[in-house]
Image (spheres, grey):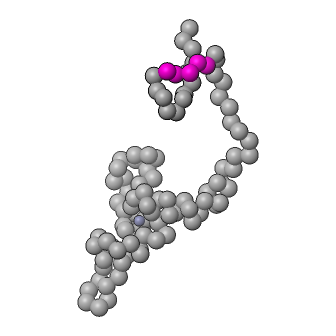
Amino acid sequence: MSNYNWCHGPECHTKQTQSRVRGSGDNKVLRTIKIKQGRYNGYQNGIWDYFCGNHCMFDFIRTHLQSIVAIAPRREALETPIKDPVKNTEYRYPPWVIEKRV
Ligand SMILES: [Zn+2]
C-alpha cells in the first residue's frame, strides 16, 4: 500500500509554485502535490494527509459541500443541557455563558 496521497484540492495542479513543476524542456507541467501520510502525526484527525494546505482543503469543501453534508445531514438543532448559566465577564467577544459554580 502506498504511503502517499495526492492532494485532493481540485485546483492543486493549477497553482503556479516551483514545488509543482515536473518534467523537462518543453514538456514541463504543474502536478498535484504528493503528500506523505502521517506527516503531522495525525494532527486534526489526519486531514493534512489529504490536503497540501488550507487553500486546497477549502477548494475541496466548496466543490463537494453538498455531498459532504449529505453524509451526516443535520435536520434539527442539537442541544446541550446547562444549569443556571451566567454571562462570563472575563471575555467580551463572544459573550459566552458559563455554568454557575456551586
Ligand atoms: Zn493541494
Q: x, y percentage for residue 97?
A: 57, 24
Residue in the picture at 36% in, 47% down: 41
Q: x, y percentage for residue 70?
A: 67, 56
- Is residue 51 in sight in this rendering? no
Vertical position of residue 7 compared to residue 89: above or below: below
Residue farthest to the right, as pictured: 75
**14 relative position to 73: left or right:** left
State the residue in front, 61 or 93.
Answer: 93
State the residue in front, 22 or 60.
Answer: 60
Vertical position of residue 45 compared to residue 21: above or below: above
Residue in the picture at 52% in, 63% down: 60
| Position of the C terminus by quadrant | top right
Looking at the image, in which quadrant does ligand 1 appear? bottom left
| Position of the N terminus by quadrant | bottom left
Residue in the picture at 63% in, 22% down: 82
What is the chief secondary structure element of the magenta stretch? strand
**94 relative position to 52: left or right:** right
Question: Quadrant of residue 35 in the image?
Answer: bottom left
Residue farthest to the bottom, as pictured: 26
Q: x, y percentage for residue 71?
A: 65, 54
Vertical position of residue 50 compared to residue 73: above or below: below
Residue in the picture at 45% in, 53% down: 47
Residue farthest to the top, as pictured: 102
Vertical position of residue 82 compared to residue 61: above or below: above
Q: How many marks?
A: 0
- Is residue 18 in sight in this rendering? yes
State the residue in front, 36 or 80.
Answer: 80
Q: Bounds of the magenta span? A: 85-89
State the residue in front, 86 or 13.
Answer: 86
Residue farthest to the front, as pictured: 92
Residue 51 within the segment the image draws in magenta: no
